[in-house]
């Protein structure tokens, strides 16, 4: 199987399926800060007695 995979990787022909480049997910870099902000907001509301 390794020989077959190497042969497929070294071929210069067009691949059987189209290969598209990966693109970044918009706003993904803000995911973690947004989650932390939401958790902090929930903790603040809970400590003030306004938890829903």
Image (cartoon, helix red, strand yellow):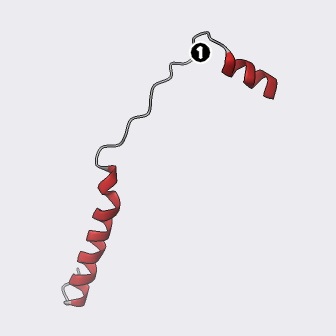
Is residue 14 shown left or right of residue 51?
right
**30 w.r.t. 49: above or below:** above
The N terminus: image quadrant? top right
The quarter of the displayed image where residue 7 is located:
top right
Farthest residue to the top: give it. 13
Going 23% across and 83% down the picture, which residue do you hit?
Answer: 44
Q: 51 and 21: which one is in front?
A: 21
Who is closer to the viewer here, 51 or 38? Answer: 38
Task: Name the secondary structure under disc 1.
Answer: loop
Q: Residue at x 30, y 64 (%)?
A: 33
Placement of the C terminus among the 4 image quadrants: bottom left
Residue at image coords 29%, 56%: 30
| Res. 34 in view | yes
> For residue 48, which quarter of the picture?
bottom left
Q: Nearer the viewer, residue 9 or 16?
A: 9
Above or below: residue 13 compared with residue 47 = above
Residue 29 sits above or below residue 3 on the image = below
Is residue 22 rendered to the left or right of residue 40? right
Horizontal and vertical percent for residue 51? 23, 83
Task: Report the residue at 59% width, 15% height from top.
Answer: 16
On the image, the x and y values in percent for residue 50 come to 18, 85
């Amino acid at each position: 199987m390794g020989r077959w995979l190497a042969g497929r990787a070294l071929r210069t022909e067009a691949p059987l399926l189209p290969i598209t480049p990966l693109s970044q997910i918009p706003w993904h870099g803000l995911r973690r800060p947004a989650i932390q902000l939401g958790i902090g907001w929930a903790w603040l509301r809970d400590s003030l007695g306004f938890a829903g």
